[in-house]
Image: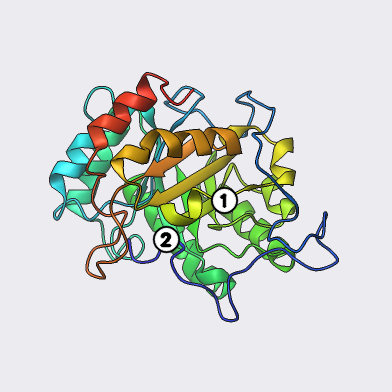
């Protein structure tokens, strides 16, 4: 995946602040609490197709199936597929210019396993025009029958709310019943929580994640609404990472030991080196 919330917008990352932000604290997203939300139901809109409520994986974007056939095959092995909340498809920084046979085959296997597939749309922190965004959405839907979309590098501040609402409303018109994930990578203005099915409220390295805290407003929403994507998680710290996600109320996670130090391969492109181990841990509820 080319971006996945790895770059900051002009002037820095979009974060809620200022007098219009409910809570109006200095920390991004308002006051933070190191405690988990009390809600535990699965009432978040659109959540649960093909999976049970509870901790599971959001796969943010493996390398192209021609480059990583073993990784794509591993997703549909018994045990792992049932824990997948969704898998992001990024053919060529979007859907590409024509249907890709390898991607069609990989998506078909996921669909047969009951796994939701999301097309990756780059919002470029609000700088991308709607025409290009919606054209990509149509291609993902027409060619790959995408079940929804990850709106990557989604702007997170209050001022972006009208544009994000319009984008999501149009995406749902393009794909009826679309599962929409907003890829903020940080806690956005609370108003974003009412727009989409899920929010990516953390995307970054383990060194930041292990000391991170949750925004206070998230307590009003169930864990099924939030996703955490963390790279550079050492194998001995897997259980700790799962506990952090549970305490902060994020039901969809992706933890990997891969890092962003290699500019040729993004941290999300390979499977975690401990894929079988984390499948076993999450499948048996060891983090609980």
> In this picture, is 25 found above or below 264?
above
In this rendering, the label closer to the viewer, 1 or 2: 1
Q: Which disc number belongs to residue 212?
A: 1
Q: Crowding near pointer 2: few (<14 within 10 Å), some, many (20+)?
A: many
- 119 sits left or right of 275 in the view: right
Give x and y (percent) for residue 50.
Answer: 42, 26
Q: Position of residue 152 (x, y in %)?
A: 48, 60
Residue 5 at least partly seen: yes
**Residue 106 spot, x, y in % from top left:** 22, 42
* Helix, strand or loop at mark 2: loop
Give the quadrant of residue 76: top left
| Residue positioned 65% across, 57% down in the render | 188
Circle 1 SS class: loop
In the depicted structure, whether residue 237 falls above or below residue 142:
above
Image label count: 2
Residue 240, labelled with which disc? none
Asked whether disc 1 touches disc 2, contact meaning CB atoms under 8 Å apart, the reply is no
Sequence-wise, which precedes: disc 1 or disc 2? 2
User: Does residue 179 show up?
Assistant: no
Quadrant of image for the N terminus: bottom left
User: Residue 101 vs residue 282: left or right?
Assistant: left
Q: Which residue is mark 2?
A: 4
Q: Residue 160: percent from the left, percent from the top?
A: 69, 66
What residue is drawn where x is 75% and y is 64%? 26
* C-alpha separation, residue under disc 1 versus residue under disc 2: 19 Å
Name of the residue lying farthest toward the bottom? 11
Q: Nearer the viewer, residue 22 or 88?
A: 22
Determine the residue positioned at 51% across, 64% down: 153
């Amino acid at each position: 995946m080319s971006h996945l919330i790895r770059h900051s917008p002009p002037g820095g990352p979009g974060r809620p602040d200022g007098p219009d932000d409910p809570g109006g604290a200095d920390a991004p997203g308002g006051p933070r609490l190191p405690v988990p939300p009390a809600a535990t139901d699965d009432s978040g809109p659109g959540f649960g197709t093909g999976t049970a409520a509870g901790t599971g994986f959001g796969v943010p974007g493996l390398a192209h199936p021609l480059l990583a056939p073993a990784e794509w095959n591993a997703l549909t092995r018994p045990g792992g597929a049932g824990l997948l909340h969704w898998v992001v498809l990024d053919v060529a920084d979007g859907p590409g210019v024509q249907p890709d046979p390898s991607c069609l085959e990989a998506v078909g296997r996921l669909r047969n396993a009951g796994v939701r597939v999301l097309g990756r749309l780059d919002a470029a922190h609000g700088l991308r025009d709607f025409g290009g965004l919606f054209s990509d959405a149509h291609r993902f839907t027409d060619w790959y029958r995408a079940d929804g979309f990850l709106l990557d590098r989604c702007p997170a501040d209050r001022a972006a709310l009208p544009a994000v609402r319009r984008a999501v409303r149009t995406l749902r018109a393009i794909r009826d019943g679309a599962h929409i994930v907003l890829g903020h990578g940080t806690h956005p203005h609370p108003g974003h929580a009412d727009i989409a099915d899920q929010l990516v409220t953390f995307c970054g390295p383990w060194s930041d994640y292990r000391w991170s805290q949750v925004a206070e407003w998230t307590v009003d929403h169930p864990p099924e609404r939030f996703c955490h994507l963390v790279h550079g998680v050492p194998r001995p710290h897997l259980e700790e990472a799962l506990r952090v996600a549970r305490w902060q109320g994020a039901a969809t996670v992706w933890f990997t030991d891969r890092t962003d130090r290699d500019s040729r391969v993004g941290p999300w492109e390979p499977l975690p080196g401990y894929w079988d181990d984390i499948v076993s841990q999450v499948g048996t509820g060891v983090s609980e």
